Amino acid sequence: KQEVTQIPAALSVPEGENLVLNCSFTDSAIYNLQWFRQDPGKGLTSLLLIQSSQREQTSGRLNASLDKSSGRSTLYIAASQPGDSATYLCAARGQNFVFGPGTRLSVLP
Amino acid sequence: DAGVIQSPRHEVTEMGQEVTLRCKPISGHNSLFWYRQTMMRGLELLIYFNNNVPIDDSGMPEDRFSAKMPNASFSTLKIQPSEPRDSAVYFCASSFGGAVYEQYFGPGTRLTVT
């Protein structure tokens, strides 16, 4: 059974810092891994989708990498801004679709 | 595009009552997913449809839950009878081409069962 964990559970950084969010999964037989952000009381917004054959995806200040063999994905956020404050979730798609518990990010002005 | 539409946005009901949640996927998407989010269990996939056919309902907690997709533009998730432990935020998501493609989420329905 796939299990997805995320470290850290919460993170608080000053504006302008570069930061890394970590996602680990136990079953490497995945089709893809997707990163989302969730604002309080809102739905999920898709950030990046990495197919199993890919190593990374980039969108603006965001870069996500995938290492299937080690069961890890990282989300790199460059030059963080207060508007980046949200909960970030990763989800691994294999036989089923399993979400991690999320990392709650606060970027302080 | 209007995105995934869910209704109602909030629902408060008494234990034992029937609850029906509704979802309209993004036009052209042929896969639809129902999720439940709670503080204790996080985000869980309940069921997903591909071309209106249920593909994986292993996440449906028990027989009190049922989901239908009568056509490509509408789906319902029904709970009967509802219980306090069903209180959660229920999300609907859709994608094009099946579960391996990017999913787009609706705003969710916050259900409170008293």
Image (cartoon, rainbow, N blue to C red):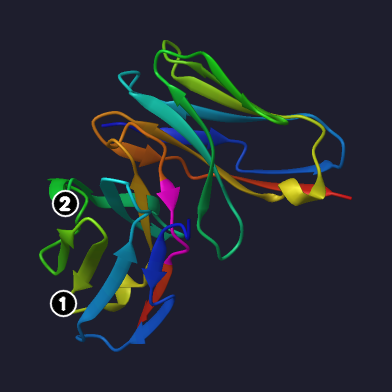
- Looking at numbered disc 1 in the image, what kind of residue is underneath it? Gln
The Cα–Cα distance between marks 2 and 1, rounded to whole angstroms, is 22 Å
Dot 2 falls on which chain?
B
- The quarter of the picture where residue A13 lies is top right
Q: Position of residue B10 (x, y in %)?
A: 43, 79
Q: Position of residue A90 (x, y in %)?
A: 49, 37
Q: Residue furthest top?
A: A69
The stretch of residues the image draws in magenta is B104-108
Q: Residues within 10 Å of mark 1 (few under 14, many from 20)?
A: some
- The quarter of the picture where residue A51 lies is top left
Residue assigned mark 1? B80
Q: Is residue B89 visible?
A: no
Residue assigned mark 2? B52
User: Earlier along the polypeptide chain: callout 2 or callout 1?
Assistant: 2
Query: Which residue is located at x 50 percent, y 58 percent?
Result: A43
Q: Is residue A64 left or right of residue B30?
A: right
Q: Position of residue B8 (x, y in %)?
A: 38, 77
Front one among B79 and B105:
B105
Query: Which residue is located at x 16 percent, y 47 percent?
Result: B58
Q: Nearer the viewer, mark 2 or mark 1?
A: 2
Front one among B17 and B39:
B17
Relative vertical location of residue B25 with respect to residue A34 in this rendering, above or below: below
Relative vertical location of residue B57 with respect to residue B2 in this rendering, above or below: above
Q: Within the magenta stretch, is there residue B14?
A: no
Q: In which quadrant will I find the C terminus of chain B? A: bottom left
State the SS at label 2: loop
Dot 2 and dot 1 within a common chain: yes
Front one among A53 and B26:
B26
Q: Which mark is residue A5?
A: none
- The quarter of the picture where residue B95 lies is top left
